[in-house]
Every structure is written in structure tokens, then in C-alpha cells.
Image (tube, rainbow, N blue to C red):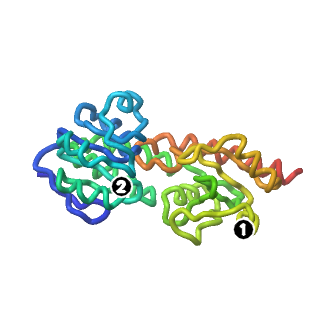
């Protein structure tokens, strides 16, 4: 018997190690792979692009917010893995009639590490989970935040522009890097405008690669309206995937901090 309380306070009880798992969350799908699972994972979403061989071969059960109940039921899972933010409550609740559901709820690095530990426990991959956790902890202990802390807007959407509030995992990583989130006083994903970004004295705009695929033309569009702001494209998976992808975050974030520091110095001299 495996029993624990998930991150929304629900008890998850498994009579034995799960042999058929459905994952509704891309970052946690990748975690299952990195824990050493393979045949045990029988269903994923159409957004679970890592690892590519699973994306190509595993059964798709819809999207993160368009889960197909009947497809999940057909797979006869003995564990379903969900997330409070990425999945819709009204779609997840009926799944409890199919199998035990583990739901994560993550807005900090510490909560991400707890999720990794719990998923490792549920899948009997505790040792592999601890190895991933130790790597992430050691790396983040070495992360040096930017010395000049620019007023920053991290944009995840366009038309309308949308940013991130203080109860998001992205905000937590921004803070770890030393970037001052100009939307720290708001929650979730507030809509914004160029005029508001100007009124907040924004100095740095980070354009995420997901969920909206920002491109160079979007940088140019913003630059025309805000010529004195530093604009940088960033890897959305690093900032928002709270599973085993965090093993790669240190190198990426360190490089980003160094690059932006250099841009700030150059801007101050111009």
C-alpha cells in the first residue's frame, strides 16, 4: 500500500506500484520518463512533447484543458497525474471514478521538489527522484542573481498581452534570478498593454517561447513603442516546466543573467 496527500490535500492511495499511468501535465510526463518509467505510462496529452519518442508513440488523451474522459477510461489506468493550474477542475473530478488521481499545485521551487519526491514515491522510483532533487538543489544553490535588478515584465501571451503575477512558478524563478516583476502585486496572469508597461517604468521585457510563440517580429513591434526597454526572448519551458527539466535551468538562467547584465551595461553607456 502506497499512501500520501497530494498538493491539494487529497489522499492518494495505491494498493500496489502503478503499472498503467496517464499523465495530463507535460512537465510531469517528462519527469516520469526521467524517473526511468516507460511501458508504465500509457497515456499523455497532445502537449507532452518531451520525450519525443513518447510524443510520437504514446496514446493521446486530448489536451491539458480538453481531457477526453472516455479515452482515459479506455486505457484503464491505475494512476492519473494532474495539476491544479494546467488542468480544469471540472475535467479532473470525473477521473476519480476511473483511478486514483495525484494533483500537484506548484508556485515555488520547493513545491516542485516536493512534487518530484511524491511522484517518485507513488511510482516506486524514490532513489531516481532523490537524484534529480539533489541535482536541482545543488545547482540552484550556486545561482547568482543579477546585481542590478531591472523592473521586468514576463509576457506569455499577445493580443492581449498577458504577464505573470506573484502566485506563479514563473514569478518565483524571476525572483530567484533577481528580476523585479512589475506585476508582483497581482495574481495569476494579468492582461496588460504597452501603455501600462510604460507606466510601470518597465526596463526589461522577457518574451516567452510558450504558450504564445513570440518571434523576432514581436520584439520589433514592442521595440517601436518602447525603444528604451531591453527585450529578450526566453525559453518558456525553463521558466514554467517544474519537473525534471529544472535540471537544465541553472546553466540557462546563469547565461541569461550574464547576457542581460551585459545589455544593461551597454544601455547605460549609450
Q: Residue at (48%, 57%) from the top-left corner?
A: 169
Pick the front one: 227 or 47: 47
* Count of numbered circles in the view: 2
Which numbered circle lies on residue 200? 1
Q: Residue at (26%, 54%) from the top-left corner?
A: 102
Q: Residue at (75%, 48%) from the top-left corner?
A: 221
Question: At numbered mark 2, what does the secondary structure look like: helix, strand or loop?
Answer: strand
Rendered position, 204 above or below 217: below
The x and y percentages for residue 88 are 36, 58
Q: Is 195 on the left-hand or right-hand side of 76?
A: right
Lower position in the chain sequence, tag 1 or tag 2: 2
The x and y percentages for residue 16 are 12, 45
Residue 134 visible in this rendered orientation of the protein: no
User: Pointer 1: residues within 10 angstroms few (<14), some, or many (20+)?
Assistant: some
Place residue 154 in its image quadrant: bottom right
Q: Label 1 vs label 2: CA separation?
A: 32 Å
Rendered position, 169 above or below 258: below
The x and y percentages for residue 257 are 65, 48
**Residue placed farthest to the bottom in the image?**
185
Residue 10 visible in this rendered orientation of the protein: yes
Q: Residue at (70%, 59%) from the top-left corner?
A: 150
Place residue 22 in its image quadrant: top left
**Residue corresponding to mark 2:** 83
The x and y percentages for residue 179 are 64, 58
Amino acid at each position: 500500500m502506497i499512501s500520501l496527500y497530494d498538493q491539494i490535500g487529497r489522499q492518494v492511495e495505491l494498493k500496489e506500484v502503478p503499472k498503467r499511468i496517464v499523465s495530463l501535465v507535460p512537465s510531469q510526463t517528462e519527469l516520469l520518463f526521467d524517473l526511468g518509467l516507460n511501458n508504465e505510462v500509457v497515456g499523455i496529452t497532445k502537449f507532452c512533447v518531451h520525450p519525443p519518442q513518447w510524443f510520437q508513440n504514446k496514446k493521446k488523451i486530448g489536451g491539458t484543458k480538453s481531457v477526453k474522459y472516455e479515452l482515459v477510461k479506455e486505457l484503464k489506468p491505475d494512476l492519473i497525474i494532474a495539476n491544479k493550474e494546467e488542468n480544469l477542475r471540472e475535467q479532473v473530478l470525473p477521473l476519480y471514478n476511473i483511478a486514483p488521481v495525484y494533483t500537484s499545485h506548484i508556485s515555488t521551487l520547493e513545491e516542485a521538489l516536493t512534487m518530484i519526491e511524491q511522484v517518485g514515491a507513488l511510482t516506486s522510483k524514490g532513489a531516481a527522484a532523490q537524484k534529480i532533487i539533489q541535482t536541482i538543489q545543488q545547482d540552484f544553490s550556486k545561482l547568482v542573481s543579477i546585481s542590478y535588478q531591472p523592473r521586468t515584465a514576463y509576457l506569455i501571451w499577445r493580443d492581449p498581452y498577458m504577464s505573470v503575477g506573484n502566485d506563479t512558478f514563473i514569478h518565483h524563478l524571476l525572483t530567484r534570478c533577481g528580476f523585479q516583476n512589475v506585476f508582483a502585486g497581482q495574481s495569476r496572469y494579468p492582461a496588460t498593454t504597452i501603455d501600462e508597461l510604460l507606466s510601470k517604468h518597465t526596463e526589461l521585457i522577457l518574451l516567452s517561447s510558450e504558450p504564445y510563440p513570440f518571434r523576432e517580429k514581436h520584439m520589433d513591434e514592442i521595440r517601436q513603442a518602447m525603444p528604451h526597454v531591453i527585450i529578450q526572448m526566453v525559453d518558456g519551458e525553463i521558466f514554467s516546466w517544474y519537473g525534471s527539466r529544472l535540471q537544465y535551468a541553472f546553466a540557462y538562467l546563469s547565461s541569461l543573467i550574464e547576457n542581460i547584465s551585459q545589455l544593461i551595461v551597454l544601455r547605460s553607456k549609450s
